[in-house]
Structure formats: C-alpha cells, structure tokens
Amino acid sequence: MKTRLTILAALCLTVFLAAVSPVSAEESSTGISVDGNIEARNQSGVHHGEVYRNYLKADLNFGKNFGNTVVKVTLRAEDDTIRPEDNDTDTQHLNEKDYLRSDETGPRRAYLREAYISHDIYFDSIIDSINLKMGRIIYTWGNSDEVKPVDIINPQDYSNLYFTLIQERKYGVFSGSMSIFFTENFFLEGVVIPEFRPSEIASNVFVQREIREASAAGSTINNPNEPDAENQENSYAGRLGLTLFDIDMHVNYYYGYDHLPAYEMEVVTLFPAITTAITPVYRQVQMVGFDFQRALFLGISIRGEGAYYERGKYFKYSNESPGGNPLLSPSPLAIDLSAGGNGSVEKDYIEYTVGFDDNDFIFDDLYVNVQYHQQIILDYEEGLEKEQYVNMILWNVRYYMFNKKFCISTRGAYDTGDKSVYGNAEIMVKLADNFEFMVGGWMVEGRRDTLIGQFDYYDMVYVAGRLTF
Amino acid sequence: MRRSVILSIGVCCVFGVSGIGSGQQLSGRDIALKVHDSNKSAAGIVLKGQMVLKNLKSGSSESRSVVALSVRNGGLSKSLFRFTDSSYSGTTFLTLERSGSDNLQYLYLRSVGSPRQIEGSNREDSFVDTDLSNEDLGGSRVDDYNYKRLPDQNIGGKECYVLERYPKSTSSNYSKHIVIIDRATMLPLSVKSYGRSGRVVKTMRSGQFQKVGGAIYVPMYMKVVDIEKKHETLLRVKNAVEKQINRGYFNRNRLNMRWAEQ
C-alpha cells in the first residue's frame, strides 16, 4: 500500500510538473532544471492472452550546476503488471515467476535510477580535463546497438526481455569514475563499483524455459547466492578511447561480478525419483573488449564490438540422454552430477557484434542498421546444452516521413542456427513536439527448445504513448 | 533531405577574432577564408537560445531550448550544439574541424546512449527535424566550394560582400549559393541556395549582430526557410558570452554528460 501511494504521488508530481512547465527543462529560480517523460503502454497477446502488460512509467530528471560541479538525479516511478507481486521474498525457495529479482521488487515501485555528482577540472595543456564522478551511474560502453557485448557494467531488468530497449532496461550502479581527456582524440576512464546488483529476470509472462522445466521436474530453486551475503568485492572497469585514421575505438576491461548467474546444481534425492536443487551463483568475470566505429562513404558507417571472457563464464551440461534412454545412456548432466560436479563447466568465451548502418539508405530518411552477432564457446566439449556457435542477424530499419513526424520501423533478430526469430513492426506518430504515439506488434517464431523459440506463443500487439517535458 | 543552406558561419561557427581588411582586391575565396577565420574565440563562446520550428502549410510550430558551445584551438574550431528540452532533449552534435581532411562530426542521441560518427556525404542532411543541416552546424570547409565574387552591395545601410559559390561535390543537392556578407562583422546576412533545377530551394537570413567579448560578433537571430518543404527554423539567441570553456566537453566520449554552462 505504501509503495502504491509512493508511485501515485510520484506520478501525480510528474504530471503536475509537466502541466505547469510549458517551457520544460527551464531552470527554476533555484537553478535546478527539471525534465522527464511519462510513458504508458499496453501489451496484449494475440493467441490466448499469454502476454498481458500494462505499463506506466515516469522519469524525473533533476540537474543543478555549482560551477564546474554538476549534480544529476533521475527518479523513476513504475507501475508494471509484468513484474510479479512481492510475496515470496522471505521464503528460502522461489517460485518460477519470482526467479531472480532484486531489491526493487514488485509491480509498483519508485526508485533512484541514476544520481551522481560530477566535477570537472580543466587545463590549458595536453590534458583538456579530468572528470570525477560518483554516485549511481548508468554507463554506455561499446558501439553496437541492442546486443552489446562490452556494455556489461550495469545490471538490467529483463522482465520484458529484449522488447524493452537496452537503455531503458539498465539500472544505475553505485560507482566512482575518473575520466581523463587528452585532446578530443584520446581518453582514459577508470571505474570502481563497490556494490553488487543482479540483473532481474522475474516476470509474470516471460519465464525462462529452463526454470519452467526445472520447476515442473520438481527441482528446488534456491535463493540466489549473492556476493553481498558472503564475499563482496569491488568490481573494476576501465577503457581507453582513441581516434586513429578516423576510426573511433575503445579497449575495454572489466573485472567484477556478472549480473546474470551461473547455476549450481546438486542432487537432493535419488529415489523414488531424481530431484535436484538449483542455486544461482554470481561469479566474477574478467572481460577484455574492443569496440570501433567509422564513417565510410555514401552515408554508410560501420561499427562493432567484441568481448573475450577469460574467466567466469559457466555453461550447463545437457540433460538430454544421447541414446534417448537415460537408464542406458545417462545425460552429460547426470554424469557430471554423479561425478560430484555442479552441472556446469567454466569455459573461455567470445562474443562480438559487427554491422553497418546508413541514415539515407537508397533514399532519404530511410535508416537501415544490420548487425551480425556471434557467440563462441572456446575449448568446447560435447554435451554442453549451448551450441558452440550461436549466430544471429539483427536489424533495425526506420523510415521517417513528414519531417520526422511519422515513422514506420521494424527491428528484431534472427538466429541462423536454430532458425528462430523475433521481430517487431511499429508505427510512430509525433502528435506534438513532445508527444509520441506508437502502435506495433512483436512476432516470435521458433522451436520451443530454443532461446528465442521458447516464447513462440508470445506474439503480441501494443499501443503506447510517451510525453516528454 | 540532403539539403543545406551552407551558412558558413553555421550556428556554432559565429565566433572568432576578426581581421577585416578593406577588401577591394580580395577574391571570393579570400573572403570565404576571412569569414571562416572571423568571429572565433580561443577561450570559448556560449550561446543560449530558443529554436522555433514552423510548418508554413499548417501554421503549427514547436519551440525548443538550445545551447551551443564553440572554441578555437590551434586554428581549428570545435563546436557543440544541444537541445535541452522537448523529446530531443540531450541530443547533441559535435563538430571537430581538421586541417586537410573532412571535419569529424558526431551525433549523440539519448535513446542510443553513445555518439555516432556522421559520414561526410550526410553533411547536407537535416539536423534531426530542423531545417539546419549538419553542415550548417560546422561541417563545411572553405575548400568544399569554388567561389566567384559579385559586385558589393549596400543592404540596409550595411556594406556587403556578395559571393556566389558552387559545390565541388557532384552529388550535392545544390547548384550554387549566393551569400551576402556584412563587411563590418564578416557575418553572413543572407544565403540563397539553388537546387539542381536552378530554383531557390532554401534561404537563410540573420541579423541583430551583437558584439561579444573582444571583436566577436554573433547574430542574435537566424531564420532558415526550406521553400520546398514549406518549413522554417528560427533561432533566437537570448544570451551570448565569451568565456573559458572546458575543452574536455569536445571529446566524443562525454557527449552524454551535462555541461556546467547548460
């Protein structure tokens, strides 16, 4: 009840500010700038009502300058029916919809999405400036779009999967950063993250197949083993940015907690049936990445990014029996568990995304962005559930009309290995300079045992409005 | 639309130290170079204003707040342009002038989160939904055109140079531009852009030149009209000052951050 009142108060405040501020982002007499947006969205399934989501969000951004010190605060209030009710947080074991949620639980919530103090020291020398920043920060690393292998500093909210854009999915992490800008072509950034926040998978709609199956098989899903409870350690990140031969590039490094867990399994009972307990464990990963972009010719730009994980990536063994009869030929998972393993194995891992885009492809105002994404498990061994290679083609095409007041678009991804696809078509009308209205749909196709195809029955249509002030 | 008014000054390139001569013997290119080198500041210029976009067919209009920063370093200019409200709030455009090669330009959109390098052939494209082109925001170079000087004119009591200039690029949407430049301030008073058909397709007018700092002049208003689209963009500068600007702002890696001058 208290949360609901907080949300309502935040939304009322936002609507009030939007209504009384004809010139938005105008600084008040105290010098504090206020802007933000309100979004309302309904998603409905087209088959049997599997998807139902009413989503109301308000972002409030406050900014204030004190000389070379800048303060920024973003408050977010959400009422999102796709997020499970906060019922079971005190229990030891989770149900499948509650699986992996963070402290900001429940369908109605208000929280500090991003807030930091930033201070600049600048010079008239080879170093242009040094920026120090501390607070809850959202980082954007890398140069590709939706699938970003090096953009791993922030946890994300996957309750609506990839149907919510990555920039909207991110949570700020408490961190401190220092950036040194050497001319406009070179810079260094270091980040320290003295907290751990997991990504959230809890969803009323998009429950992962492996969790559904584990639950159906009677497995126990334990509460996640989070670093906070035992061995919290700082995470560290750094990057070096350089422009050389008109190629913008970064070398990225991250050593810290993965925001998605590895799964540790153990056998609970052997008779009368084999049951297991699954404990999500957050491991520390070490990633070295590289990203680049360059404008070429005829309006075409190429961009991409890749990440190599030297440690911390675990892959589950398959629970499918090679011969079809688990008594005669046990599955790799059963073999590993019976040998005292935990059902997964650590492997070096690479993923990268490369592609091109053009703002005026063939004719004016047609934006085309095509990217290729590949995941590779190094030192692969037979019996792992995940294929050694995952290949995907991603697209994002938009056509603007009437001076960008009207836009038709499509985006999505096609997995060339298991031939599954998710895709979107949308019509956006800009009814006013600060108000957009959108109608669209998502289509998901593929075998039920695939990463994308598991949501084959979750085709949906949606209608949304976004007011910016 | 691959169209441009080719303002020379651009919105952000109205700054600098002027070295204005008598000008009778100057060629068209010499005058273009003078315009390019005039009204620039080594410390920095900050402009704050309001941009009004108007649909001339329907009469509807939209208003946005803008902030522009510019600095000149080692004879090369850097400029930033940002919307600070509306659905385009945070949209930022960075131009880095380079000697001997095309200027580097980056567009930052809040929804994308990282800056996008703009390809040279997109210079004549509109900057988001305005009538300003990427080139107007500092993307053009003197050497992108051939120049022809026309007889000087007196317009509204101002002695003016008149230039015709022709894009060297065969893919340009324009056949020529006629630029009228105020001799006293070296700021363009007007630009008429002719399409391949030979008709005027776009115009720019600026005025209310105000002295900022030493010998730097800034147009306090500028209106660009796209005649074919029947759309106009009016920029009114409310505040223009010369001040020391943090040069770190002009690094593409920090286009997502708020400026102290905002």
Image (spheres, rainbow, N blue to C red):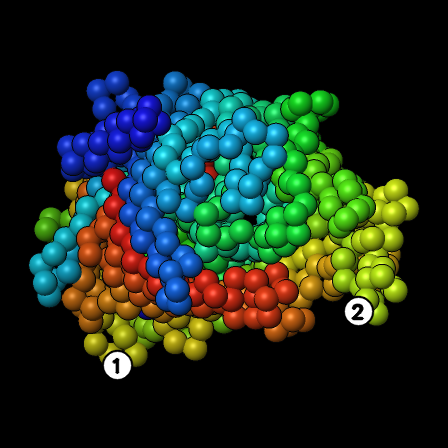
The chain letter under disc 2 is: A
Callouts 1 and 2 close, C-beta under 8 Å: no
Residue B199 drawn above or below residue A320: below
Chain letter of disc 1 in the image: B
Q: Nearer the viewer, mark 1 or mark 2?
A: 2
Location of residue B230 in the rendering, given as x and y in whole percent from the top left corner:
16, 66
Residue placed furthest toward the front: A272
Please name the residue shown 38% across and 60% down the image: A49
Q: Position of residue A100 (x, y in %)?
A: 57, 39
* Image spot of residue A159 (x, y percent): 48, 46
Which residue is outermost to the bottom? B197
Image side of residue A38 versus residue B56, left or right: right
Q: CA distance from mark 1 to mark 2?
A: 73 Å
- In the picture, the quarter occupied by the C terminus of chain B is top left
Residue B56 visible in the displayed image: yes
Q: Amino acid at mark 1?
A: Ser
Which residue shows up at 67% across the image and 66% down it? A391
Q: Is residue A178 left or right of residue B38?
A: right
* SS type, badge 2: loop
Mark 1: secondary structure: loop
Q: Is residue A55 above or below residue A121?
A: below
For this rendering, which residue is in front, A15 or A161? Answer: A161
Q: Nearer the viewer, residue B169 or A131?
A: A131
Tell me the number on the disc at residue A324. Answer: 2
Q: Residues within 10 Å of mark 1 (few under 14, many from 20)?
A: few
Considering the image in quadrants, where does the N terminus of chain B appear? bottom left
- Quadrant of the rendered structure where residue A80 is? top left
Closer to us: B163 or A284: A284
Q: Residue at point 16% right, 36% down?
A: A19
Q: Which mark is residue B197?
A: 1
**Residues behind callouts 1 and 2 on a single chain:** no
